[in-house]
Image (tube, rainbow, N blue to C red):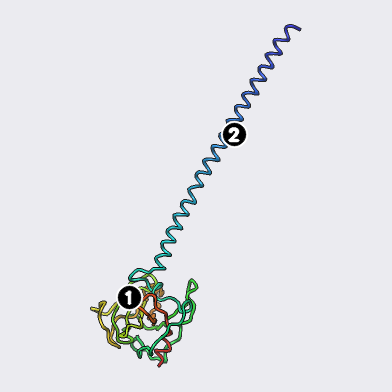
């Protein structure tokens, strides 16, 4: 049996070697898996960074809305009266005329409280008219700002002579020739023409007209809207 003893030892040695190799391979596999998991974890860690960056942009946009630029868009200019306390008005607003040529007061429809997209309230009156119909100043006042925006399109902000009211004209096709900021428009003077610019919708020709009470004309976007329908019906 002496001859079998060395063979047995050889077999045992081979088995031990195979076990060692298998153990080594298993360890390499675990290390590889850990490395892959670490790589995946690292790649996912970029995502929150990107989200944080996006959130930063959103916060920046929100800050811009909270503190409008000197010449804000119509969406930020006239906050909903439903979200603010009713303004104290000392004295009646100036007498207004319908700011669209050829439209009578009895033809107007009250759209002030109608719902709009994104949970907004209209806070204005829409006056339908053919494309190019003259838009006239509803009252005497200074042309405060000529402005173009995605929603309002071509717009005009007019300040009343007593500096207490802002008259806002939107979706205009174009301004009257030579109209400029600082010009004092007289009631009935042509200042623009009816159009469908902004988000009015192609072919939906009308004037979007609103009246807001302001405490500081320099911050005309912080005015509180009042219903122009009741003022135009007088």
Residue 224 can be seen in this image = yes
Q: Is residue 183 toward the left or the right of residue 65 in the image? A: left
Per the image, the residue denoted by label 1 is: 218
Quadrant of the rendering where the N terminus is positioned? top right
User: In the image, residue 84 lies at what x, y percent?
Assistant: 46, 78
Quadrant of the rendering where the C terminus is positioned? bottom left
Marks 2 and 1: which is nearer the front?
A: 1
Q: Residue at x 43, y 82 (%)?
A: 87
**Badge 1: few (under 14), some or many (20 or more) residues near its Cα, within 10 Å?**
few
User: In the image, residue 106 lies at what x, y percent?
Assistant: 42, 92
Task: Give the number of marks.
Answer: 2
Foreground residue among 81 and 210: 81
Foreground residue among 122 and 81: 81
Mark positioned earlier in the residue sequence (2 or 1): 2
User: In the image, residue 148 lies at what x, y percent?
Assistant: 33, 72
Residue 32 image-quadrant placement? top right
Q: Residue at x 60, y 26 (%)?
A: 24
C-alpha gap between disc 2 and disc 1: 69 Å
Residue most extreme to the right: 1
Per the image, the residue denoted by label 2 is: 30
Residue most extreme to the top: 2
User: On screen, 51 above or below 2?
Assistant: below
User: In the image, residue 29 lies at what x, y percent?
Assistant: 59, 32
Label 1: which secondary element = helix
Query: Could you tell me if the residues under marks 2 and 1 are in contact, i.e. CB atoms within 8 Å?
Result: no
**Badge 2: few (under 14), some or many (20 or more) residues near its Cα, within 10 Å?**
few
Q: Residue at x 69, y 17 (%)?
A: 12
Residue 153 image-quadrant placement? bottom left
């Amino acid at each position: 049996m002496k001859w079998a003893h060395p063979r047995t030892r050889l077999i045992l040695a081979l088995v031990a070697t195979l076990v060692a190799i298998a153990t080594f391979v298993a360890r390499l596999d675990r290390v590889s898996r850990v490395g892959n998991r670490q790589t995946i974890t690292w790649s996912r860690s970029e995502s929150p960074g990107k989200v944080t960056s996006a959130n930063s942009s959103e916060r920046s946009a929100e800050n811009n809305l909270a503190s409008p630029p000197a010449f804000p868009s119509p969406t930020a200019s006239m906050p909903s009266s439903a979200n603010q306390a009713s303004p104290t008005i000392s004295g009646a607003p100036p007498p207004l005329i319908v700011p669209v040529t050829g439209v009578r007061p009895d033809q107007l429809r009250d759209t002030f409280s109608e719902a709009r997209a994104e949970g907004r309230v209209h806070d204005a009156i829409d006056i339908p008219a053919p494309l190019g119909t003259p838009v006239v100043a509803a009252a005497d006042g200074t042309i405060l700002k000529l402005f173009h925006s995605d929603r309002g399109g071509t717009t005009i902000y007019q300040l009343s002579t007593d500096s207490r009211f802002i008259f806002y004209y939107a979706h205009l096709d174009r301004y009257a020739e030579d109209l400029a900021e600082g010009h004092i428009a007289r009631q009935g003077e042509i200042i623009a023409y009816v159009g469908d610019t902004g988000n009015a919708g192609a072919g939906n020709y009308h004037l979007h007209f609103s009246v807001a009470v302001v405490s500081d004309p320099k911050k005309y976007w912080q005015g509180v809207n009042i219903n122009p329908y009741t003022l135009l019906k007088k």
